[in-house]
Amino acid sequence: MEKKPHVKNFTELNFTPPMAPVNTGYSAAVLDFKKKLLEMLKARKGEQLLQIPEFLQWIRSLWKAVKFENFIFSFRNTLVAHAYDNLCKEFSDWEWSFRKNILSLISKAEVQLSNTETSSIHGVVDALNKKTVKEHMIQSEEMTKKLKDYYKTKDRSVHLVEKYKTDFIKSIKSLETEMKNEVNKRLDLAIEMKKNTAKLEEIHSKQAAMVESQVLQLLQKYKARNDEESDEDLKADFERMWRREIANFTGLKERDVPADVLKQLRASLGNRQVNEDLQNVTNLTHYGQDVFKVRERDQCQKKVQNFTQLCLKPAVTEYIDQSIGPDIVDAVLENKSTAYST
């Protein structure tokens, strides 16, 4: 095979079994890979490169595909397997394009929200929600069109994967739902962060004005006095003022952590066929209260009984019938039946 300088692989490390210790040349190969990667990035300064969050999302998507696509090994016909593999590669590219466009839209929305005044944030959020809904619809329709166009191609192997078309259409809908949940989660987080920042700035300005007012009152108080105060007296008065004002601070509002966790579970697992079970859950604090018990004795006794009935009893019965049975019959015939009476 022709060697391509822009493609870096680790074929020189493939001589060790999968579970063998790491090859000593692995670190050197990784270092060489990093150097090649940096050289490529320097050579392509004018191109738009993948950002770290997008790269991580791409890796997660790749890992998800590797982890769950084990049904391809059930194909008995290699032509069907090859055709399905080609379709999966195309579908993976479409999926990544879908995710990339939505993630880019989310990043721009987060920047826009961070630069928006708190008073006008609701109007911006409504506009962003409409924009994201429209983008989801566009990407979903485009992905569905690509799938239909793929099945319209004149490739001889396309008809072999015709029965999997509905599965891929369902995957598109599932992807759309997943990305909608991701957008809502990221936007809610950005809005909450913006509101919390505004609250923090408001508290900071109020407390700074309060401290400044109290310090000015102390200064006016000592200016009106004729006698000179010592540093200890000034410090004591300041400490009393400080403790009095600190006592007026309100603490953070207590959050309902179980409710937040349950809300996140419903959002994350809503498209995984457990939505009905989650709807029946009202409060997570009711779960995990009882002591976890392992009925080891009961399980062992049950296993022993099953082993005795299914394994030992048939074996002993067969041994008696085939080996000891004739001896007992002979002994009975020889008037030795009293030795075998119960």
Image (tube, rainbow, N blue to C red):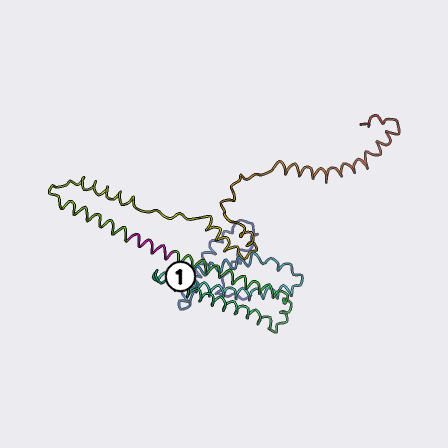
Viewer-nearest residue: 217 or 66: 217
Q: Name the residue at 57% across, 57% down.
A: 68
- Crowdedness near tag 1: few (<14), some (14–19) or many (≥20) residues, C-alpha within 10 Å: some
Q: Position of residue 126 (x, y in %)?
A: 42, 64
Quarter holding the N terminus? bottom right
Side (left or right) of 49 relative to 16: left
Viewer-nearest residue: 225 or 235: 225
Q: Is residue 197 magenta?
A: yes
Location of mark 1 (residue): 110
Side (left or right) of 194 relative to 278: left
Side (left or right) of 99 relative to 80: left
Quarter holding the C terminus? top right
Rendered view: 334 above or below 19: above
Q: Position of residue 114 (x, y in %)?
A: 36, 60
Task: Spot the residue most to the bottom.
Answer: 154
Question: Mark 1: which amino acid?
Answer: Glu
Dominant SS of magenta comes to: helix
Q: What secondary structure is found at the residue carrying circle 1? A: helix
Instruction: Indicate the quadrant where residue 233 lies.
Output: top left
The boundaries of the magenta stretch are: 193-204
Q: Name the residue at 40% across, 69% down.
A: 46
Q: Is residue 271 magenta?
A: no
Q: Name the residue at 15% across, 40% down.
A: 230
Instruction: Indicate the quadrant where residue 51 lies.
Output: bottom left
Q: Position of residue 29 (x, y in %)?
A: 48, 56
